[in-house]
Structure formats: structure tokens, C-alpha cells
Amino acid sequence: MLQDSFGRRFYYLRLSVTDVCNFRCSYCLPDGYQGKPDEAFLSASELEAAVRGFAQMGTQKIRLTGGEPGLRSDLPEIIYRLNRIDGINNIAVTTNGYKLPQRIQHWADAGLNHLNVSIDSLDSSTFHEITGHDRLAEVLEGLAKARELGLTVKVNAVLMKGVNDDLAAVLTWLKQTPVTLRFIEVMETSDQAVFFRQYHVRGDDIRQSLLSQGWQPVLRDVAAGPAQEFWHPDYAGRIGLIMPYSQDFCATCNRLRISSLGKLHLCLFAEQGIDIRPYLQTGVPTSELVQAVSEYVQGKKATHALQSHNSGAMANLSQIGG
């Protein structure tokens, strides 16, 4: 089992397949993607090599992220390859929902079983304002189709003061919709310091409000993400909160990240990643990747430094998938 010097075990790998994103979300890429869309992102075979190594180290869950992973035409092939690896029992994708109704069947056929869809508002005009795209109806259609296909579906929403922090519409929707909607605190990055100060909402304030209304905590699985989830007997859906500024947020960390260029990130807000791409090439024994990663993980710090306004090398969240 992959374990760091603080006894934390890593069951969960977030694997970015591209930096490219076609949305212009105000909290991430307000000016659109500014990188190089023709960069040599990890190939399907390199991604498979990475996951084979991590599976040998006890990783059970793989989340494919971006940018927007759906922009890769070979995403179904990637899902299929990873789904066949022994020890991996959960393949998830996080998507902005672009063309999801046309794509979700192919992803499910390849072996996808969990889907996270970013829906920052259930109001179409607010959704358009946040993302730069008038596609809420399309995204909701894709979400409904994913549920029909039997996938476990969760919705992500970045919580922003005065923009989407009125929970009335969300609670009405969750009365009848059996999904988990997870609110994510705005996180400060080097590109978004002013935005953070203007729009940050403390997730703990939402948590206290939920508890006062009879919502109850859900026990976390060992391979679960960082959200604290809550359920209520009167609601079909659940609410989750991702609160990176809360005390002891990092104490239960169970995930590592690999960027689309093959850099291992021990923390979302660490300094420059560690290049592990040489270990992902044909002919390189998996044991070499296992040994290298096991050693690198011992250097993982106890916590991030967000409270000190230090986001490390993170300029925006599309870089390694949030």
C-alpha cells in the first residue's frame, strides 16, 4: 500500500488527460484556455502504464480529469484500457458536460461507472454567465442519460458569494433528484487572488446551516474524495461540501495527481510536479515506477499552505484537474 510519512494511504488517483478546456468559467479560465492545445499530452498507453503501477500500490479509484477530458477523441479507449486493470474498481470522469448526451453512452460502454458533472447554477442565465456557454439544458440532459445508464452521478458547483450561494433552487431540485451535489469553496490561485477575496464563501457556514435543518453526515469510504456529504430523509439527493480551508482538511488526504504532461503532484497546491513520464514508456518495468513513486510520496507535506495565501505552482485549476 502506498503510504506517506504521516500514515496517509492513497487509494485514489486523479489523472489529467488534457489541459485544454472549451469553457471560460469565471473562477478558473475567464479568458479561455491560453495554453498550447497541441502539447504532447500523455498517450493512452502512458496513462495505462501509470495506472498499472498505481494499482500495484493499492490505488482503487481513478478519476480522469482535464481541462475537459471529453475533448480527447480517444477517451473511450482510455476508459476501456484502465477498466481492465486488476485492482481498479472505480473509473470516474469529471466533465463540464459539453456534448454529454452524445458522449455518455460511449463512455459507459467502455466501462465508466462514476460521473461528475460541473453545474455551477441551475439557472440558465447564471450558468451562461459563469461558464460562457448557454448549455445548461444540454448538460442536464446528459446528466439524466447518465443516470438512466446506471452510472453513479455527482454534480460539482463552485460556491461564489452573491452568484450561486442561495441554496433554495438546489434544495428544491434535490427533493426529487437522486444525485449528490457538492459545493466547492473557491480556492485562491496565483491568477485569481482578487476573485478569491471577492467571491469566497466559507463552506462551514453552509455545513452549520444544513445541520440545523436536519441534514446528517454520511460515513466516508476509504477511496472517497474530499467532500463531506450529508443526507436528509426528506430528500432524494445529497449535498456535499469540499472545504479546503477547514481545519484538518489534509489529514484524511487519500489522493495523488498526475498532470497531462506526466508530472506527479503530491498536492494540488504543491510546487512544480515531479516528472514521472520516463517511467511510463514501453519497456520500462512497472517496478521502477512503483519504487520511484513510493520514494517521492515520502516527501508529501502534512498540509497545503492555502491559509497563508500560497497556492504553490497552481495558476489555475485546469492545470491538473482540480
Image (cartoon, rainbow, N blue to C red):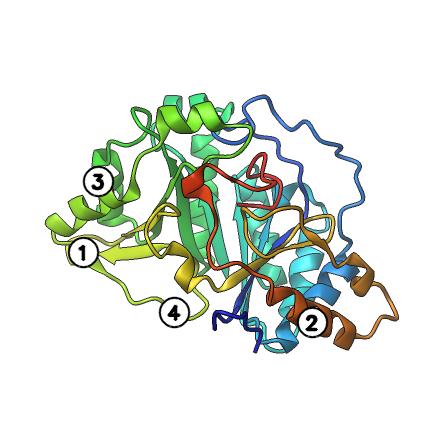
Horizontal and vertical percent for residue 310? 50, 39
Horizontal and vertical percent for residue 175? 21, 47
Cα distance between the residues tagged 3 and 4: 27 Å
Label 3 or label 4, whichever lies nearer to me, is: 4
Residue pointed to by mark 4: 221
- Along the line of sight, which residue is nearer the eye, 46 or 144? 46
* Residue 213 visible: no
Crowding near pointer 4: few (<14 within 10 Å), some, many (20+)?
A: few
Compared across the picture, whether 130 is left or right of 176 comes to: right
Label 1 or label 2, whichever lies nearer to me, is: 2
* Residue 203 visible: yes
- Along the line of sight, which residue is nearer the eye, 56 or 245? 245
Residue drawn 68% across and 27% down? 34
Give whichever of discs 3 and 4 has the lower sequence position: 3
Q: Which dot marks residue 172?
A: 3
Residue pointed to by mark 2: 53
Residue pointed to by mark 1: 232
Label 3 or label 1, whichever lies nearer to me, is: 1
Cα distance between the residues tagged 1 and 2: 40 Å
Crowding near pointer 2: few (<14 within 10 Å), some, many (20+)?
A: many
Q: Secondary structure under badge 1?
A: loop
Residue positioned most to the right: 283
Q: Secondary structure under badge 2?
A: helix
Horizontal and vertical percent for residue 244? 39, 47
Cα distance between the residues tagged 2 and 4: 22 Å
Compared across the picture, whether 306 is left or right of 202 comes to: right
